[in-house]
Amino acid sequence: MDKSTNISTLWQSIKLPHCKCGSLIGKILIYLILVLLSAAFLVPFFWLISSSLKTNTELYANPPIIWPAEPQWSNYRTAVQSFPFLQYLGNTLIILGCNLLGTLLSSSLVAYGFSRIDWKGRDSVFILVLMSMMLPFQATMIPLFIEFQKLGWLGTRLPLIVPAFFGNAFNIFLLRQFFVGVPKEISSAAKVDGANEFRIYSKIILPLAKPALASVGIFTFMRCWNDFVGPLVFLSDNKLYTLSIGVQQIMGEFDPRWTLMMAIGMLMVLPVLILFFVMQKYFIQGITFSAVKG
Amino acid sequence: MKKTHRKMVCSLTILSMLAALSSCNSEPDNNQALSNAAATGEKEIIEYWYPWGGDSEKYDLACLAEFEAENPQYDVKETYVPSDGGLDNGKLLAAIAGGTPPDVIVTASCASAYALAMQNAFEPVDEFLSKAGISPDDVGDTFKDIMQYKGVSYLVPRDVNLSSLFINADIFEENGLDPNAPPKTLDDLNKMAEQLTVADGNNYSRLGFIPWIDGGDDALVWPFMFGATVFDVNTGKVNLTDKKTIDALEWQLTYAEKYDPEKINSFASGFGEAFSSDHPFMTGKVAMTVQGNWFTNAIAIHAPDLNYVIAPIPAPEGGRYGGSPLGTNVYGIPKGAKNPQGAAYFITYNLQYEIMDPLYAEWRSISPFPADYENLSAVKNGDKMFEMYLEIGTNPNSAHQGLTIVSNELSTSMKEIRDDVIYNKIDPAGELAKVETSLQGQVDKSAE
């Protein structure tokens, strides 16, 4: 059995049983439920778009205005001119790119060690790694701050980038669950052919793990894209700030300027949305595998 | 070929990563910069954190540029720190703990700043201010409470915001009331509120007054106006079971019983925010409301034709009529600041009435320095509303409220109790006693 057949067989085995709704009414019912459930997620998104195009008066009108009579596209221009949008976007992308690279490399390497190599105390160490997930950022913030201060990294992007190269418990867990599902025989066969562990990891396991890596990539993207507290605490120069902080910079002392906030909110949601649609096939596969195997 | 291409991509990726990381590390270290500056006679750095964006930021940065232009020996390194200068999100505490605090912060969360001052998170500033030319004696009596803790100054008041009763003059006149004879007592307020309320079938088309909207949403406002002091800074005692606090809640309950809070909610569901022309006071859906001085500017922008007057918030006998709860933007020099004296000069410069005057004129916030009043353009231009705010702000009944180490918990708990009183008709005394015990425990623990 080659590896693709093996994965395909595994995939088939975890599919949920088909609902026996052969009749037209059954299908209509299912689609109706799906449409209603989708609406629950789509309505707030629609409201975000609609609000980003309203005037202040339309935003608070009663009864609510579904779609503005004259969409205020200028809200977007005003919003991006309210703070250094391009500079913050560039900063966000630098941090994001480095985090993606660091997380994918380190988490997959650590996950490989926890799933494909037998060593004494492996499971205990894995539990310790998992426990680090339970610590809220507020609890580790000051020790981390002091640590980065001692390293002379405060006020630079390093505190937001370097930790990504040392793995992340959630991503390690996700990838480990996937790696555990890959038959050991594949590794054994490679070892017989003279491959060492790193070669097996890089040439066999990683190519097989594309769906799980895509999931980790999307999670990392969302975490970095939306991270507010990290950049706020570790950066001390407006020139290095990210978009999530820029959103707040629109607000004056008394006037929150909600329509502009909505416009920036919309601009910030778009990349995440596009990424999800492009990668959704891998994402769903990755999540399903990682959740079921182990 | 394919292999070479991959290697090239790989090398490029690593090179870009290294470039990104080296550029990350190329940001100057402030402490290093400061010591270098001292050694070479270069500019002194003042690290400054400010919490607002939008037009407020533009104004702040313009003042900063003027300071640098007039004081070329200083280089102010400004950082935007939402939402309150790093007080509540932990940024300031982390910076203090890490030994890298800014030299000066400004914040609108004066109660949170005061709570931190009580916990020794700010430097005593009397000596620095004295060298910079400011004495606590220059600050008006009503504004000193936010400045000092146990006789020592930790915070420096900038612009003071206060509340008043906003009255729709047209609605008053239509109903035979004189807007220039505003309600002073609660009896007056209750009667006028009833007279101005218009029922529309089972709902309302106008309410005379709702105690808990706008400025009244802060659940400490009415106990304050009733004369209660919920925390005594000198003795460290939380006092929520004062009869005045209970009376304030029971008075709000009379509105809930009379006008039905659910019906009010239904009526209020379409109310716009203060900075929209759909605000109920601007649309005439509410005839009187309690709101801050800055609301006058919101009206000027969104309902410039509205005919209204302002007056002191009504209060019962023994209450604080003529005064107002104050909300002041304050400067503070965090513990361990590298350049506290430079920060004090920066603060002193910014507090000059020439610098602050445009802000006072636009938002009608008032200066904490009474000696400035005659020089302010709003006074010179005969702005009656501004003069009213000066009267309210300097009235001995005005004060900052809830200045305690547990200010956030106090504010949240009081709001929960108030909502329980209004919507669930609970007896406030029991709940207030429970919260008082709990908060007192926290205060005592922090004092150990």
Image (cartoon, rainbow, N blue to C red):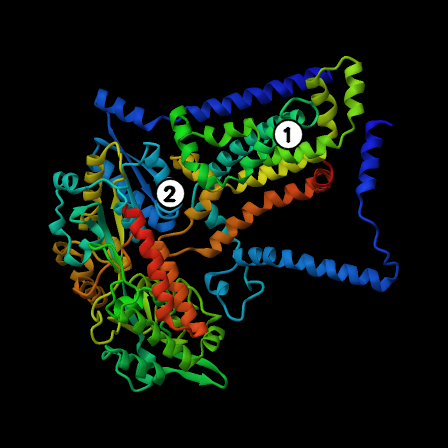
| Residue depicted at x 57% and y 29% | A167
Q: Report the Cα–Cα distance between label 2 and label 1.
A: 42 Å
Estimate how packed mark 1 is, as few (under 14), some (14 to 19) or many (20 or more) residues with alpha carbons within 10 Å.
Answer: few
Name the mark on residue B81: 2
Occupied quadrant, residue A109: top right
Q: Is residue A212 above or below residue B436?
A: above
The residue singled out by tag 1 in the image is A123
Q: B344 left or right of B102? A: left
Considering the image in quadrants, where does the C terminus of chain A appear? top right
Please tell me whether mark 2 sits on a helix, a strand or a loop: loop
The foreground one among B359 and B209 is: B209
The foreground one among B218 and B120 is: B120
**Amino acid marked by disc 2:** Val
Name the mark on residue A63: none
Relative image position of residue B301 (x, y in whole percent): 36, 63
The foreground one among B156 and A120 is: A120
Relative image position of residue A106 (x, y in whole percent): 60, 26
Relative image position of residue B172 (x, y in whole percent): 31, 81
Q: Is residue B123 above or below residue B26?
A: below
Residue B109 visible in the snapshot: no
